[in-house]
Amino acid sequence: MAVDPLQAALIETWTLYAFGSLAIILRVCSRTRLVGFSGYHADDYLIFFAWACYTAMTVAIHIVGGTGDTSHLPMEVRLSLAPNAAAKLQKGTKWFMVGWYTYIGLIWTLKLNMLFLYRRVVSVMWVKKFILPTMIVVGVTGTAIWILFATACRPFHKLWQILPDPGPFCFPQSPIFLITVLVLNLATDICIILIPIPIILPLKISTGRKVGLLILFGAGLFVMIAAILRVYFVLVVQKGETAAIWSCREDVVAVIIGQATMIRPLFTSRFWGKDPLNSGYSSNKRSYGNSESHELSNRSKMGGASRLGFGKMKDPYSISVLDTRQNESEEMIVENERKPSSVGTKSASPERSERVERDKGLCGPGYGVHVKRTVDVSSGQYGENRHQGYNRNTAHSNWNAV
């Protein structure tokens, strides 16, 4: 039994939409449990707008798939159309324009979504300074495309006009629309993909994790390829239904890429525990040779409202998870210990001891355990031992509660 190509395309469209929506729902659930509604950031709010655009775009694709549109209609076909058939094509063309606007709303919102995440997790300053300009470029290009849709064909209703012929550029699949969107889409995607590369490559992590990160961010390459194929199938092959499917594939991959980082905590045992942020859920391990720096979280004294997601919580992603800077404080300590003491002489033989002071009063939110090192220097210059104590707060042993 042969399968209707249109029916198969619609089934794939809604299946892909289901996967994309599931990714968004999981992201919202993860963020709400971790930080609460009051802990949302800009990207958490933007995802709701992206989801609305995604839904409207999928509905538009479904309608256009059943009605068609006025793109690439030869003059003889325009002259022979019955009024009902012409009205059907005009309806499809209007929904095609809805699809265009919501497609830009979805893809460009996902770009901003990723950039807002970068602003929170990237701490390498020379890399971070490129994020804001990229955000501005993304915002300007997205707005410019919307303006292009509204002004390229004037008056606007000529986009679905059948007779007289509105001209070579007044139809939804106009080369002006397709080429402009493709060029700006690829340019902004390249900028977004390049931002994390200088941070991921030097990370002192296992090869498997590094490859996983590169695949995550490099999946944007598939989005770029899908965008190219969509334009190819319209302008070269002139198969709009195939182009629509590739557009849906591009969208679902872009959605999943944008939510993957936020969904990952769902696959950890701590997330499903009684208190997902307690005792190091937001642990951030940075490699500095053989030392590590940890970010700890403590919600043990938070009220029930916080646990239900309504209280203000510290965002576990506000810490730097892409920090590759070296531990300057540790290096300074090592360098100072190599130098002779200003109190001792050539016969001085310092006796070092370490002690850990735990202050029970510093257990609330916003505090942590400070590990201090006290070194007693014995001076033999005056024939007796004179002890001079000094403290160094070692950065790699300093645990800050988030």
Image (cartoon, helix red, strand yellow):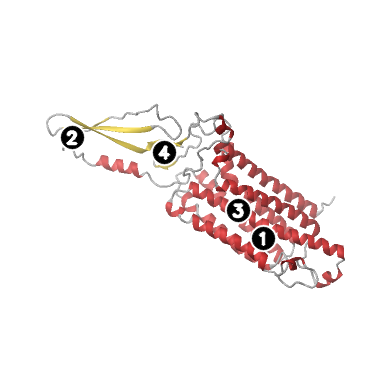
Q: Depth check: give the residue in front, 106 or 328.
A: 106
Secondary structure beneath label 3: helix
For label 4, the residue is: 292
Q: Quadrant of residue 188?
A: bottom right
Secondary structure beneath label 4: strand
What type is the residue that disc 3 sits on? Thr
Between disc 2 and disc 3, whose residue precedes? Answer: 3
Check the image and report above or below for 183 versus 373: below
Give me the disc on residue 109: 3
Q: Could you say where residue 173 lies in the image, as x and y percent from the top left?
A: 71, 65
What type is the residue that disc 4 sits on? Glu
Q: Depth check: give the residue in front, 257 or 59.
A: 59
Between disc 4 and disc 3, whose residue precedes? Answer: 3
Label 4 crowding class (10 Å Cα cut-off): few <14, some 14-19, many 20+? some
Q: Could you say where residue 61 lies in the image, as x and y percent from the top left?
A: 74, 55
Give me the disc on residue 229: 1
Q: Are marks 4 and 3 in contact (CB under 8 Å)?
A: no
Label 1 crowding class (10 Å Cα cut-off): few <14, some 14-19, many 20+? some
Label 2 crowding class (10 Å Cα cut-off): few <14, some 14-19, many 20+? some
**Alpha carbon separation for disc pair 4 and 2:** 32 Å
Give me the disc on residue 348: 2
Q: Are marks 1 and 2 in contact (CB under 8 Å)?
A: no
Secondary structure beneath label 1: helix
Residue drawn at the location 49% of the way across and 53% of the way down:
197
Between disc 1 and disc 3, whose residue precedes? Answer: 3
What type is the residue that disc 1 sits on? Leu
Check the image and report above or below for 309 versus 88: above
* Left or right of 45 in this view: 126: left
Q: Nearer the viewer, mark 2 or mark 3?
A: 3
**Alpha carbon separation for disc pair 1 and 3:** 22 Å
Q: Are marks 4 and 2 in contact (CB under 8 Å)?
A: no
**Alpha carbon separation for disc pair 1 and 2:** 75 Å
